[in-house]
Amino acid sequence: MSPSDRKLTYSESGVDIAAGEKAVELIKAHVRSTFRPEVVGDVGGFGGLFAVDWKRFDDPLLVSSTDGVGTKSLVARLANRRNTIGIDCVAMSVDDIAAQGGEPLFFLDYISIGKLVPEEIDEMVSGVAEGCRRARCALLGGEMSEHPGVMDPGEFDLVGFAVGVVERSEVLPRDVRTGDRIIGFASPGLRCNGYSLARAALLERAGMDLHGPAWPGAHTSLADVLLEPSVIYAPSMLELAGKVPVHGFAHVTGGGIPGNLARVLPDRCDGVVWRGTWDEPRIFAEIQRAGDVPDLEMQHVFNLGVGMLAVVEADATERALDVVRAEGHDAWIVGEIVDGHGRVHVETR
Amino acid sequence: MSPSDRKLTYSESGVDIAAGEKAVELIKAHVRSTFRPEVVGDVGGFGGLFAVDWKRFDDPLLVSSTDGVGTKSLVARLANRRNTIGIDCVAMSVDDIAAQGGEPLFFLDYISIGKLVPEEIDEMVSGVAEGCRRARCALLGGEMSEHPGVMDPGEFDLVGFAVGVVERSEVLPRDVRTGDRIIGFASPGLRCNGYSLARAALLERAGMDLHGPAWPGAHTSLADVLLEPSVIYAPSMLELAGKVPVHGFAHVTGGGIPGNLARVLPDRCDGVVWRGTWDEPRIFAEIQRAGDVPDLEMQHVFNLGVGMLAVVEADATERALDVVRAEGHDAWIVGEIVDGHGRVHVETR
């Protein structure tokens, strides 16, 4: 019998329902490890149920965000290491929630993949669950979808979606004003932004090997550095906002420091950020050198070592630094708010 | 200067920030067209804000779901028609919300694409917005992400997330019992399931042309039939549940009628579904013939013309049919609940 005479099944067309079911079994323990008391029911069902404790709030708003890991997924695939990319996925969405002053409540993930290998899904979701535990939000649901013929077998995309709650009177940004100081939270790596440029510079242009040293003499591999999981700032941001007058947070994603700081500026203020006031992880210089990337381009694509900006009242600056450092993050005063027109100036000190 | 001497920019690495910004401008009107009074603020910000009217509920639960359009995106791309795939994306998530008895409140979309063409994004989001208007939920946020080197230029994936609210006492399924009748809501097409098998059978095995007739003598093209947008049942489901005793809904997605009906069955009941009691759109027979697909496989992969099942009290069956039909859907009695062990039997009449 020739192949074209065979009866066609879903499995032969590239979708393996049994593999999907096995993956669901594997991930159940990860999912349950994230549950908060508000989760109603268990894994399964057509959607996740969550009982917000409304009595904790006077006038609660839901706040919601979605984002993916971009082409960091390709680096994870090339390095055959999928256990931390889920942390990145959670970080992107929950830190957007916290940037509005919101407490992340729950998270859902969506994985599309060329060929569904249950063990690979298990590895990815273990990272998602770790991210949810770090963000203190429940992994309330998710979906995995096999895309044969559209994605290569090992190719995958990981997308996240988070919902949080915030008191209406505490929504950020509010009241950003001249004289405020800008505090930067350290990011040891790229988070999820700029990977297309980083790959073009390091892997294509410079021909570097992911398994080789990250730079001459480095003790860590390029894969280690590029797959450094995104720090999840949300709990520390909420801690900070609870203790000192925070006027705004800017999550440094696509657009870099200038693109994101601009989002919290009122029309009558500019933001000034001083490069040189924080430690820029070496990987950024390596990318810049490998690709001969213009400085301005670097600033608009990468976080350059600062993954979150907090705009705080000037006289609370030192206290704010103490809080953020006590939460385990390196932090620096990286700039200030001045009179202006909603623009950001990056100056080099 | 050789190409490898050139300064590398994000744009040259395949990510066009200006295209992204243009796309955001284009979609704003679509997004705003979906806003409900509960939406706080406007397009932009790090996350969408939504003020649920909690006073409408005694003990509200949030219900959340995520899903994508699967490889239906490839058909849309091959047919160069992207204006309805967003409706499919909304349908998948909001009908999962309604299947739990929930009222969809808001939706977020995530688009990953090989090369970001603002006009293509505009087309896709116009469909998402149309879906949101049909589902009566707000398009509260979204993200678009360019994946050069990972996805081909025209390749895209479209993922959705929906959040709804349901009174705790009205969560479905509840009280599915022997004697209940099963009502099927008509689906004119495949919704978002089985496209890998459909493509393998029709395009690869039978060598059909998307732009040719869907079958010999058909007045519609194969693209028309395969891109038939998913019906959004949510508003009609809520209408039905408000008027007659509904014990459960099964959204017929991956796993087909048996796989999804099983999800609402208690251990002591079986579900019996009678094929032949509804009109199966011809496309399913064409797929089966082109791929010589076994009958059992067809049942587990495709909706076969029934996109939603409602389990209703026997003496409310006729009233239920009237309500669903008055909402504009074809509907039939397609089965019943009997004593059993949580299994589904598909019988042919």
Image: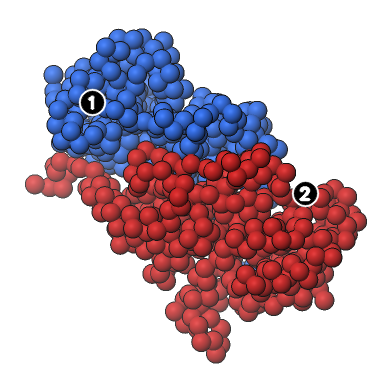
Chain colours: A red, B blue
Which residue appears farthest toward the right when viewing the image?
A339
Residue A302 x/y as whole percent: 65, 65
What number of labels is visible? 2
For residue B93, side relative to residue B265 (left or right): right
Residue A168 visible in the snapshot: yes
- Tag 1 near tag 2, CB within 8 Å: no
Q: Identify the residue at image location x=40%, y=51%.
A: A112
Q: Identify the residue at image location x=78%, y=71%.
A: A318
The chain ID associated with circle 1 is B
Which residue does the numbered mark 2 point to in the structure image?
Answer: A174
Q: Identify the residue at image location x=65%, y=28%.
A: B37
Residue A89 visible in the snapshot: no
Mark 1 surroundings: few (<14), some (14-19) or many (≥20) residues within 10 A: many
Q: Is residue A185 above or below residue B307?
A: below
Of residues B134 and A325, the one nearer the viewer is A325
In the picture, the disc for residue B275 is none
Residue B283 x/y as whole percent: 28, 26
Q: Disc 1 residue type?
A: Arg
Q: Identify the residue at image location x=37%, y=55%.
A: A32
**Comparing marks 1 and 2, which lies closer to the viewer?**
1
Which residue appears farthest toward the bottom when viewing the image?
A217
Of residues B65 and B89, the one nearer the viewer is B65
Residue B303 x/y as whole percent: 29, 30
Q: Quadrant of residue B306?
A: top left
Q: Quadrant of residue B133?
A: top right
The chain ID associated with circle 2 is A
Which residue does the numbered mark 1 point to in the structure image?
Answer: B177
Disc 2 element: loop
* Image quadrant containing the C terminus of chain A: bottom right
Residue A13 x/y as whole percent: 26, 46
Disc 1 element: loop
For residue B90, side relative to residue A174 (left or right): left
